[in-house]
Image (tube, rainbow, N blue to C red):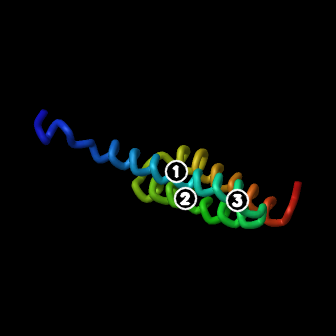
Amino acid sequence: MGAAECRLAPQEGMLRLKGVRDIAAGLLVLAFMRWCTQRETGLVLLVVAIIPVGDMLVILAGKGSAKSAFGMHSLTAAVMALAAIAMMTGAR
């Protein structure tokens, strides 16, 4: 197998990096859920909610699908932020 056959398409490489980033962020939140307080976990979740906002902005800047950007990524960020706020304020 030649070196050219082992290379990833730019889109495939980016998706793999995004997947690793998302898994790491999810594991971080799970670790905080296990070993930290609810307020600390909420704060981490709020910070991690920046990731889908960044994804949305990258899609929009690249002239990608606005429907995908707003429908998927902004909704994800909003749900994460609302859950984080509820956790930090102690809402049940």
Residue positioned 70% across, 52% down in the render:
79
Q: Earlier in the sequence, mark 2 or mark 3?
A: 3
User: Which kind of residue does numbered mark 3 sit on?
Assistant: Trp
Give yes or no for contact between labels 2 and 3 (Cβ–Cβ under 8 Å): no
Q: Is 46 on the left-hand or right-hand side of 22? A: right
Q: Position of residue 54 (x, y in %)?
A: 51, 60
Which residue appears at 45% of the width and 57% of the height? Answer: 58
Q: Which residue is mark 2?
A: 51
Numbered circle sitting on residue 63: none
Q: Residues within 10 Å of mark 3 (few under 14, many from 20)?
A: few
Q: CA distance from mark 2 to mark 3?
A: 23 Å
- The foreground one among 11 and 87 is 87
Among the two numbered marks 3 and 1 on one chain, the one whose residue lies closer to the N terminus:
1
Number of callouts? 3
Q: Which quadrant is home to the C terminus?
A: bottom right
Q: Quadrant of the N terminus?
A: top left
Q: Which residue is mark 3?
A: 35
Mark 2 or mark 3, whichever is nearer to me = 3
Separation of disc 2 and disc 1 at Cα?
Answer: 8 Å
- Tag 2 near tag 1, CB within 8 Å: yes
The picture places residue 24, in percent across and down from the top left corner, at 52, 53
Q: Position of residue 65 (x, y in %)?
A: 48, 46
Residue that label 1 marks: 22
- Secondary structure of the residue carrying numbered label 3: helix
Q: Pick the residue in front: 28 or 87.
A: 28
